Image (cartoon, rainbow, N blue to C red):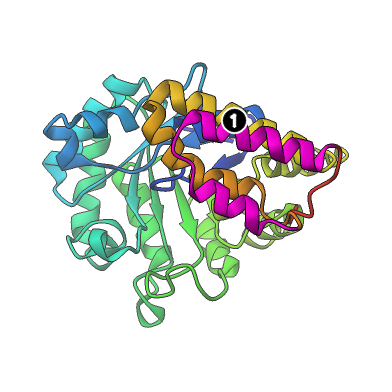
Amino acid sequence: MRIGGVTIAVPVALAPMAGVSDLAFRTICRQHGCGYTVTEMVSAKALMYQDKKTCRLLELGQGEHPAGVQIFGSDPACMAEAADKAVRLSDADIVDINMGCPTPKIVNNGDGCALMKTPELARDIIEATVRAASVPVTVKMRLGWDKGSINCVEFAQMAQQAGAAAVCVHGRTKSMQYGGVADHDMVAKVKAAVSIPVWVNGDVHDVVTAQRALAVSGADGVMIGRAAFGNPWLFGQVAAALRGEPIPALPTVVQRVETAQAQFALAHEHLGERVAVLEARKHFAWYLRGLPYMQPYKLAINAMQSSGDFYALAAQIKRDNGGHFSTNRM
């Protein structure tokens, strides 16, 4: 898969997700077969104010290439300046514009998927960002605002004409949020209408659904979101399937815990102990989903206050479950 001058050898990507796809988790996903990662979405306005927390979101992991930075906003000049600054701060290979986020706090400001209701403004944003960025610019979008205003085909064509080097289409409308069933047939219509690469996103839960999404949509690559929570092995499984290779075996519980520990160590180094522990409360629970008798562990995870608590609990879980396979959905 080639986006502008950027080659993505393994067209299996981690979708950018606020509060999830931080440097530590992206690094773990790359280590387990993910071919392309994108930062959490960053506010263009916050970046203009040089907010320290926002700038930190743009930091890439060691050797994290090819990788993208995702920005959001609805002012063309601000987005252009933010794109230039984001690339200089991160050394990213691609700038991705978020035009698909459905959350109220984003769309109520005219950002994210709200831009699919104002394609003229969206075009101005893409054109300004393309002019300012020294790397290819891509667009993440949905089918449209709601069932009565599906405009993904026309929107993707506009994005291509405005200079976008690729689009990612989540097969749901804004109104659907993350419910219902993703429509990969509509993604196929987008693919047929443009000549730039297309990512398919939505309802990719495992190897079978990844293959189905690609087959139905004809997309060039697959972007995986929520199914990757606590399951970075999914990227290697999908990549192996696309190459026609045997699917890697399921990890044991011990392997899951050790991977959670590796992620925690990265988060601790990057974010400090307090934030790393708070992040571990959700990530560690995700790593253990499907494990029998999970409730006591979940209570202990939610009560963690320090790195000592984390490592003590990790050691206990490994003692309790040494050698056993998880019943995780893989």
Identify which residue, 101 or 93, lies in the foreground.
Answer: 101
Residue 23 falls within the magenta-colored stretch = no
Q: What residue appears at the point 69 percent right and 54 percent down from the top-left corner?
A: 210
Is 204 situated left or right of 237 in this image? Answer: left
Is 13 situated left or right of 273 in this image? Answer: right
Is 90 situated left or right of 36 in this image? Answer: left
Neighbor class of circle 1 (other Cα within 10 Å; few <14, some 14-19, many 20+) is some
| Amino acid at the residue labelled 1 | Tyr
Identify which residue, 91 or 8, lies in the foreground.
Answer: 91
Q: What residue appears at the point 35 percent right and 64 percent down from the top-left corner?
A: 102
What SS does tag 1 mark?
Answer: helix
Count the numbered circles shown. Answer: 1
Quarter of the rendering containing residue 23: top left
Identify which residue, 150 or 227, lies in the foreground.
Answer: 227
Furthest residue in direction top, as rendered: 62
Residue 240 in percent (x, y) is at: 78, 38
> Vertical placement of 270 versus 99: above or below?
above
Q: What residue appears at the point 31 percent right and 62 percent down from the top-left corner?
A: 113
| Image quadrant occupied by the N terminus | top right
Magenta residues, start to end: 293-322
Q: What residue appears at the point 45 percent right and 41 percent down from the top-left corner?
A: 279
Q: Report if residue 148 is visible in the image.
A: yes
Q: Which residue is mark 1?
A: 311
Residue 200 in percent (x, y) is at: 56, 54
> Vertical placement of 318 versus 221: above or below?
above
Residue 268 in percent (x, y) is at: 45, 25
Q: Main secondary structure of the magenta part?
A: helix
Residue 206 in percent (x, y) is at: 71, 54
Residue 306 falls within the magenta-colored stretch = yes
Q: Report if residue 94 is visible in the image.
A: no
